[in-house]
Amino acid sequence: MSRTGSIALRVRFLGVVVFLLLLVAAFALVSPQFLTVSNGRTILFTAAILVVAVAGQTIVVLTGNLDLSVGSIMGFTAYVVYDVSSGSPGLQAAVVPLALVVGAVLGWLNGFLVAVLEIPSIVATLGTLAVYRGATAVYADSGQVTSGMIPGWVKSVSTGTVAGIPYYVLIAAAVVALVGWVLSSLPWGRRIYAYGSNPRAARFFGLDPTRIVIGAYVAAGMIAALAGLMLGGQVGVIGSLLANGYEIQVLAAAVIGGVSIWGGSGSVVGAALGAVVLATINNGLVQQQVQEYYRLLIQGVTIILAVGVDAVVQRRVTGINRRRRIMEVAK
């Protein structure tokens, strides 16, 4: 990432922090119950699953692609894994590895469609969104995974705390830390940024776009599967529509958090902060008893504003870099 792009990223991150603080101040003014420790814990708990899901989406978006099938992967994985494992104590202890395998397969299919068949990611994952959701409905056959079919340890994790901090918040923090470390410290992470910044240049320098894109989708699928297990453990009763519409929230959180939808710019920490912003907005509006359709309206406007800001920042960075190159040539 160029120095100018890095500065723009920091400015956007600080902008999100300021926006979050203003949100908290505004909601605290109109609702005395908003600014309490218990409500803060509720916001973080609500945001935790979204934070996990957006960590995977961030990897894909950094390559310059999108994954609209996140919610369907979450729903499919949670339903199938909990249903299959319900009859075997051995499998109940291994639901996480099972989910990661399922998520990896679904993510690989997304990556294959985008990287090998060269289908635009928005079209490919819109198709798999429907395919995975339909497969869940066919498998479920109008049935449900009940609370008794979910392993006891999963339900304990979904409700447990450590020093007052929900396990889910700690899991989300661990996932963000792991993804952040991979993206910033491992060669694979640096290739993700390099490819997303300039795919043509990345090919010129010998990077394999197929491996990079498929790898990003596989990682995102595995992380979405983990988020699906968490959501299933939280709601207790799982139907074929679990996590329906989650992809919009995940994409919104990534964009609000400063991850450029054009790829190559952004951080998983910023994306996680975007998820907290969405959870804060939703919590504050619920306390004000705002109807769900108005909340969706506000969420949609927030996405449009975030994308607009991203477009402005992208144009400024591109313009500054172009002028700098012209000045260097003119010297």
Image (tube, rainbow, N blue to C red):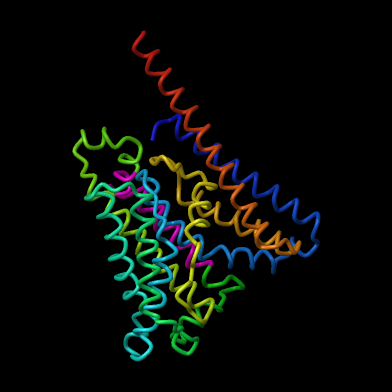
Q: Which residues are magenta?
A: 169-192
Residue 102 picture quarter: bottom left
- Identify the residue at image location x=64%, y=67%: 41
How many numbered callouts? 0
Relative to the observer, which residue lies in front, 47 or 288? 288
Compared to residue 259, the image places residue 142 above or below, namely: below
174 drawn magenta: yes
The residue most toward the left is 206
Q: Position of residue 3 (x, y in %)?
A: 43, 30
> Residue 254, position in %: x, y?
49, 50
Q: Is residue 214 above or below residue 88?
A: above
Q: Residue at x 53, y 47 (%)?
A: 257
Residue at 58% in and 66% down: 46
Q: Quadrant of the N terminus?
A: top left
Residue appearing at x 47%, y 87% in the figure: 152
SS assignment for the magenta stretch, majority: helix
In the image: residue 151, left or right of residue 160? left
Q: Is residue 284 above or below residue 92?
A: above
| x and y, in percent, of residue 256 in the image | 55, 47
- Identify which residue, 129 or 250, lies in the foreground: 129
Quarter of the view holding residue 5 = top left
Q: Is residue 110 magenta?
A: no
Rendered view: 252 above or below 43: above
Q: Is residue 280 left or right of residue 62?
A: right
Where residue 282 sits in the image (x, y, percent)? 65, 60
In the current view of this chain or complex, which residue is farthest to the top? 331
**Location of the C terminus (image quadrant):** top left
